[in-house]
Amino acid sequence: MWLGPARKRPFNPNRFHFNFRWFWDYAGGLMTDWGVHEIDIALYAMNADAPKSVMASGGKLAYPDDPAETPDTLQAVFEYEGFNMLWEHATGIDIGPYNRREGIAFIGNNGTLVLDRQGYDVLEEKQSVNYNEEGKSMMRLIEPVMRPEGVQYIDLHTENFVKAIRTQNAGILKTPIVSGSVAAINAHMGNVAFKTGEKVYWDPAQSKFSSKAANKLITPDYQNGWKLPGY
């Protein structure tokens, strides 16, 4: 029952519990593991759902001899209408850009908004206005924004979710339920691009890729008597 529709194999503790996410039979590595948490916020903020195209590059570069299957290093570029999203992960690395373990950076002309589960910071761009003997004079493009102290963001989401359940009112959710599925689908698209080695283009009208190889990866191979549920 734990294997579900994945192919049958003898019990292996390395494929069980936490490590299951590093095997294609059960999951999609860090692209889907963390992707649903980060991409969810990015697309919700940008009011986007499906990308126009995706390309990805990576592999087992840091730990080539370990028994995992999914890439420990991956970069994926998602093209949307009006902006691009760059995904990057490196398994086993707990310090990343902006001195964070994980997070998102919204990079704009006048500043960059960096956020994670602990809060956010605004990093301002500065514009040179003149030079003099004392050095470069700088002009602010945005007003500085201070991070609120003592705010537990996950607790606020939890309270909001519980309140929506108790009142049976999904309309009060700060983040709509559909955003979860949108994030998951986009994360899987990153893995599709990686597996095919192609820049794949998405047709939202037909819910298909431009690539035959990519389209074959939309539906998993159901085994052990399991079938894709019908609606």
Image (cartoon, rainbow, N blue to C red):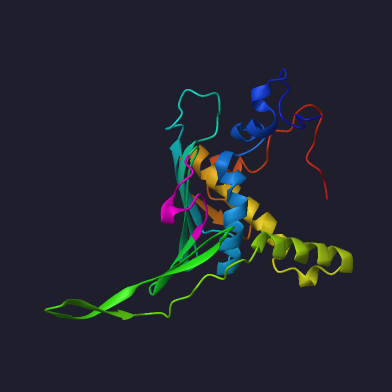
Q: How many marks?
A: 0
Regarding residue 198, the answer to whether it shows in the image is no
| Residue 131 vs residue 207, the one in the foreground | 131
197 and 190: which one is in front?
A: 190
In the rendered image, the vertical position of residue 69 relative to residue 83, given as above or below: above
Q: Is residue 19 on the magenta stretch?
A: no
Residue 207, how many percent across, how many down? 64, 54
Residue at position x 50%, y 73% in the image: 146
The quadrant in which the N terminus is found is top right
Q: What stretch is highlighted in magenta?
A: 93-104
Magenta segment, prevailing SS (helix, strand or loop): loop
User: Residue 122 appears at what percent x and percent y?
Assistant: 46, 69
Query: Can residue 3 be seen in this snapshot?
Result: yes
Q: Where is residue 51 in the image (x, y as percent from the top left)?
A: 54, 58
Q: Residue at x 85, y 63 (%)?
A: 165
Q: Residue at x 64, y 37 (%)?
A: 27
Which residue is pictured at 57% across the width and 48% down the height? 189
Q: Is residue 98 magenta?
A: yes
Q: Is residue 123 left or right of residue 175?
A: left
